[in-house]
Amino acid sequence: MDNTFTQNQHLVSVAAGEVNLEGNLVIPDGATGIVVFAHGSGSSRHSPRNRYVAGVLQQAGLGTLLIDLLTHEEEKIDLITGHLRFDIELLASRLVDTTDWLTQYPQTHHLQIGYFGASTGGGAALVAASKRPESVKAVVSRGGRPDLAGSALPDVQAPTLLIVGGYDTPVIGMNQDALEQLRIQKQLEIIPRASHLFEEPGTLAAVAQLASDWFTRYLTPESS
């Protein structure tokens, strides 16, 4: 399932407050946009699902940055307590720091920025997008918790696509409620016969294609 391009991939370290975050950066030739992956509940930049989606985006000519929003030490704590993955303000602040880094990094400063959030990372992506409206041009949430963005939802200016599995009933309702609070270009896509992790045949490919179309549409200079 992992079709990520590896020849152009390199490890980067992003300063976020008092910690450094590790990420895998890929920039295809001629890229006009880059997508930052905000992982959720117990996931990391090594997630096969996110690596698969990243590979599809790279094939569409988009750069990707799969970054761990928690340090190794924090991940160990979170495996026990499970509370850091729900610390939306912490995750969002680190996404903001990552965004600022991208705007200054020589290889990425010219690229339009988008967020791909999964699970609680979906909420963090929307909060971060509301804090950097001049930089973040598109958001896609996969099985996300946009409801966790709370009062930040009406302030999001980036066109937002919410993708949910048809079997993921509680999360569908959360996404529908969040959709009503968004005041920008927005869309909710429900993938039939898909559960929360999109493990059913063909469902993750559908997510990746929807995300690719959305980012290709909005992460171009003409759409900004």
Image: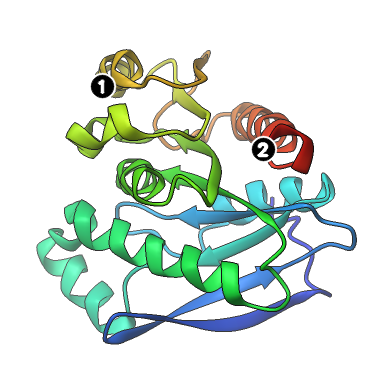
What amino acid does circle 1 point to? Met
Q: Position of residue 134 (x, y in %)?
A: 50, 48
- Name the residue carrying label 1: 174
Q: Residue at x 70, y 78 (%)?
A: 106
Q: Is residue 10 above or below residue 61?
A: below
Q: Residue at x 37, y 35 (%)?
A: 144
Q: What is the quadrant of residue 145 in the picture?
A: top left
Q: Residue at x 31, y 85 (%)?
A: 19
- Name the residue carrying label 2: 224
Whether residue 68 appears in this view of the structure is no
Q: Is residue 175 above or below residue 112?
A: above
Whether residue 41 appears in this view of the structure is yes
Mark 2 / mark 1, whichever is N-terminal: 1
Q: CA distance from mark 2 to mark 1?
A: 29 Å
What amino acid does circle 2 point to? Ser
With 115 as the anchor, is 32 left or right in this view?
Answer: right
**Residue neighbourhood size for the residue with mark 1, other residues' Cα within 10 Å, grouped as few (<14), some (14–19), many (≥20):** some
Q: Is residue 136 above or below residue 143?
A: below
Name the element at disc 1. Answer: helix
Name the element at disc 2. Answer: loop
Q: Position of residue 109 (x, y in %)?
A: 66, 68
Q: Residue at x 63, y 29 (%)?
A: 201
Q: Position of residue 146 (x, y in %)?
A: 31, 33
